[in-house]
Amino acid sequence: MNQTLIAFVTGLTTGGLSCLAVQGGLLASTLEHQLEKELIARPPKNARNKVKRGTKINVNLGFPILLFLGAKLVAYTFLGFLLGAIGSVFQLNAFMRAILLIVVGIFMLGNALRILNVHPIFRYFSIEPPKFITRYIRQTAKNGTDILSPLFLGALTVLIPCGVTQAMMAIAIATGSPLQGAAIMFAFILGTSPIFFIVAYLTMKLGSKLETLFMRFVAIIVLVLGLVTIDSGLNLIGSPLSISYVWNNSIKASQVEQSIPASTLLTLNVENSGYSPQILKALANESIHLNLVTKNTFSCARDFVIPALGVQVLLPDTGTILIDIPAQKPGTVLRFTCSMGMYTGQIEFSN
């Protein structure tokens, strides 16, 4: 249940902006016919006595957005069900999940640079529906079938998920349960809907200048999310090149190191906000016993991974799990992380 709540909060905070950056073109196509009708029905600037007529159009503009988001919610819920079913048969290991995150992160970076018009080459990061589908949609709009277009395009968004959505899809697969997969995708898309609706509505109503400024803002957000996603993937493969690893070690180097004796029995508290302590010290050339302690822990920190050893353990929400770590040479650093590469830490071996 807590994982579903996290999915909802993720959608509410970052997912809406990320989805809008990738799927905004589909929504624009949905509203194209409606906007054309608005321009025709809009009274001249000097006709101040016809304000009520314009107000009526505002309601009509919101209706296709609601249809679009409703179809999107249903489509992604069904997709989550299928992904959970696939996950029940085929589980992604840490390495495959890391590759997925890195690829998604690169796509997000390219998409952000495309929005910022950095170089024409980044236009290839734009995923659009096939031309025959676009032609069909436009023909449908010309024929006045206003309900079918937003429903069809909303369902079509499953073909072009944003980077954050793809991360949620990976989580849905990892649940190994059709119902849990459906619940995660439903909660995430539901969370994206308010921001998606408000921003899309205001952007369409307040003009192209605001739209340009907003898209630049979204591009920066997606750029940051792309870097975070790549960093998570690097953490999952235990790379020393990850931003979080370099940052943690730079802080450690600038601080006075505490005198913590190395031991063969280590205890790591697995919390909702990460791992404590983040740095453990172990004796080299000795087998190590690592106690992982959870207490009402429901975040992805429960899915504990040591990439270098191929260790991946799903911990109970409350309890203690013992992991045996083979003897390591002096100077060895074993990095550990959660299954999404968000929470990290390391074990340092010395004499």
Image (tube, rainbow, N blue to C red):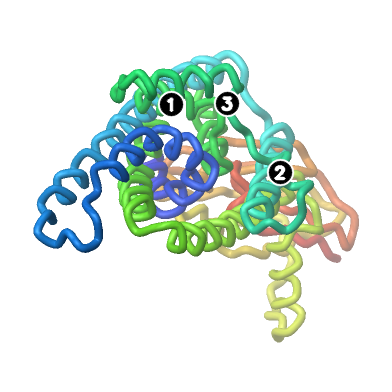
Number of residues whose C-alpha sits closer than 10 Å to that of mark 3, classed few (under 14), some (14–19) or many (20 or more): some
- Front residue of this view, candidates 4 and 29: 29
Q: Distance between the residues labelled 1 and 2?
A: 21 Å
Q: Distance between the residues labelled 2 and 3?
A: 14 Å
Which secondary structure lies at badge 1? helix
Based on the displayed image, in which of its 4 quarters is residue 185 positioned? Answer: top left
Which residue position holds label 2? 123
133 relative to 166, above or below: above
Q: Which residue is drawn at 67% across and 35% down?
A: 97
Which quadrant would the N terminus be assigned to in this image? top left
Count how many numbered circles sit on residues in the image.
3
On screen, residue 161 versus residue 177, left or right, reads: right
Q: Which residue is drawn at 18% across and 50% down?
A: 54
Q: Residue 235 carries which label?
A: none
Which secondary structure lies at badge 3? loop
Residue 75: percent from the left, percent from the top?
Answer: 40, 22
Residue 309: percent from the left, percent from the top?
Answer: 78, 40
47 relative to 139, above or below: below
Name which of mark 3 and mark 1 comes first in the sequence.
Answer: 3
**Callout 3–callout 1 Cβ contact below 8 Å:** no
Which residue position holds label 1? 153
Residue 176: percent from the left, percent from the top?
Answer: 51, 22
Q: Residue 129 carries which label?
A: 3
**Callout 1–callout 2 Cβ contact below 8 Å:** no
Which secondary structure lies at badge 2? helix
